[in-house]
Image: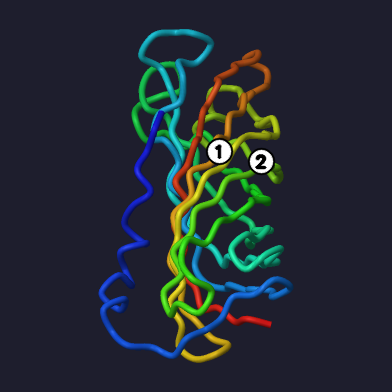
């Protein structure tokens, strides 16, 4: 599914109209960004074991995000993105696992992402919009079956790890020669198979989480 890279990038758009000191981006610079990272996954999985109309969903979660971009040239950089572990509640949409909202489980994941970035404007511009693309690696861990799943005889939950493409758009706005603020949006292709096991047997569901990741950051140029 194609999604728009939208809202957080607009958070500092009004600032672009103001004057600001130039902050030159040059080959060899390292750009550190630290702030909030909000993961907003797709709200509905595929059908459970291909049973029509019976699915699960995951909620949104916000954590501390941190990234470092190494500028290979004045306009091209390579970013490594990380975050504190994201936690998502998995609940039933309807059907096999109980009424909508039934507690199916809780999972944590880390989604490190490596991207190439292109900065459009002259290196001395106070405003630095950019786009990027790369690879997302999502590692799931500490999966726990929820109370409603356990009541149905499923006491073990596991999710397969994922490797997929990621695209992003963002903008930096300089405060002074070294500091800046940033907002960005990223779409990551994350697909997994969730498995519930227990005395009741085994249930599988394919879930394309495919989240939008919104970030608002403070940045520093080294």
Apparent side of residue 202 relative to residue 63 in the rendered image (left or right): right
Depth order, front residue of 188/100: 188
Depth order, front residue of 42/214: 214
Give the secondary structure at mark 1: strand
- Which residue is at the far top? 51
Depth order, front residue of 194/33: 33
- Residue at position x 65%, y 31% in the image: 157
- Residue at position x 49%, y 8% in the image: 50
Residue 63 percent across, percent down from the top left: 54, 63
The quadrant where residue 155 appears: top right
Apparent side of residue 68 relative to residue 118 in the rendered image (left or right): right
Q: Give the number of the disc on residue 204.
A: none
The quadrant where residue 55 appears: top left
Q: Is residue 207 above or below residue 200?
A: below
- Residue indicated by mark 2: 143
> Badge 1 local density, few (<14 within 10 Å), some, or many (20+)?
many
- Residue indicated by mark 1: 105
Contact check, label 2 and label 1, Cβ < 8 Å? yes
Residue 126 percent across, percent down from the top left: 43, 80
Residue 170 percent across, percent down from the top left: 45, 60
Q: Is residue 3 above or below residue 11?
A: above
């Amino acid at each position: 599914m194609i999604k728009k890279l939208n809202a957080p990038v607009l958070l500092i758009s009004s600032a672009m109209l103001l004057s600001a000191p130039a902050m030159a981006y040059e080959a060899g610079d390292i750009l550190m960004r630290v702030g909030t990272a909000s993961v907003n996954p797709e709200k509905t999985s595929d059908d459970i074991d291909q049973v029509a109309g019976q699915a699960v969903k995951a909620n949104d979660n916000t954590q501390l995000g941190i990234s470092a971009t190494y500028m290979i040239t004045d306009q091209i950089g390579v970013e490594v993105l990380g975050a504190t572990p994201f936690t998502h509640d998995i609940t039933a949409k309807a059907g096999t696992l109980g009424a909508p909202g039934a507690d199916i489980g809780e999972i944590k994941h880390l989604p490190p992402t490596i991207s190439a970035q292109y900065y459009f404007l002259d290196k001395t511009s106070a405003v630095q919009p950019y786009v990027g693309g790369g690879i997302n690696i999502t590692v799931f861990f500490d999966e726990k079956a929820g109370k409603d799943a356990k009541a149905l005889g499923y006491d073990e939950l596991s999710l397969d790890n994922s490797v997929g493409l990621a695209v992003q758009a963002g903008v930096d706005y300089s405060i002074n020669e070294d500091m800046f603020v940033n907002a960005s949006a990223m779409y990551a292709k994350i697909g997994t198979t969730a498995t519930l096991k227990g005395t009741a047997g085994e249930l599988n569901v394919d879930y394309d989480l495919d989240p939008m990741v919104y970030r608002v950051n403070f940045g520093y140029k080294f």
